[in-house]
Image: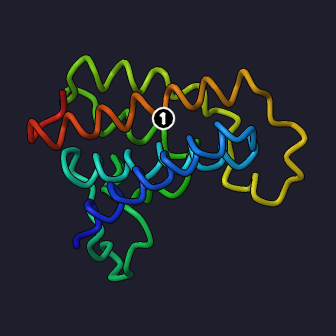
Amino acid sequence: MDHAEQYASAAERHYFDGDFLHGDGRLPNADYHFGFAVECALKSLMLRYLGATMGPKPNGKFAKGPWSLGEDGKAQEYSHMPKFIDGIRLLAEGRAGARLTTALDALSAFDRWSVDQRYLDGSDADPTTVESRRAVAYDIIDLHQLALLGERLP
């Protein structure tokens, strides 16, 4: 299984785990999984359709995540959200359909999401925010599945 497929599989797994936890009222962990679902689906899209790679970087080092050459000729690695959201917007510029543009605009729901949530006590999990992120995660997963079916970005 290649990296794009692994990210796609992880995206669905995280989304379904998040949805299960959301239904059980476990909002902090649901929120965490929704963020990773989006991150993994976007990385799969970057690798499949937006020119990112997992190959060795120009300096010969292996990448830990998708990367592409920036305008400065240096490798731009896409680690975790929300850090790489601007990067995916640049990669998608001029290539994307309206559906991806709309989905990228909705990513503002994750502006304050962080992989570091795993270290927090979860007391700041806001039900409205988690529901918003759940909806965005659903849309991104749906967009990803449509792209796979049509073999192009919708």
- The residue sitting at the front extreme is 24
Of the 4 image quadrants, the one containing the C terminus is top left
- Horizontal side of residue 48 vs 7, given as left or right: left
Residue drawn at point x = 51 percent, y = 58 percent = 79
Quadrant in the picture for residue 24 = top right
Q: Give me the residue at 30% from left, 68% from top.
A: 54
Secondary structure at badge 1 equals helix
Task: Determine the image quadrant of residue 31.
Answer: top right
Q: Where is 11 relative to 131, above or below? A: below
**Quadrant where the image shows the N terminus:** bottom left
Residue labelled with disc 1:
137
Report whether 60 appears left or right of 25: left
The answer to whether residue 57 is seen in the rendering is: yes
Which percent across, then down, holds residue 62? 37, 80
Residue 112 lies in quadrant: top right
Task: Please state which amino acid type lies under the numbered disc 1.
Answer: Ala
* Residue that appears at 44% across and 32% down: 138
Residue at horizontal 35 percent and vertical 50 percent from the top: 70
**Total numbered circles:** 1
Q: Is residue 74 visible?
A: no
Q: Position of residue 131 (x, y in %)?
A: 64, 25
Q: How is the image coloured?
A: rainbow
Which of the pair 58/125 is nearer the observer?
125
Name the side, left or right, on which 75 lies relative to 80.
Answer: left
Q: Could you say which is closer to the camera, residue 75 or residue 14? A: 14
Horizontal relation, residue 82 to residue 128: left or right: left
Image position, residue 45 (x, y; %): 28, 46
Observer-nearest residue: 112 or 95? 112
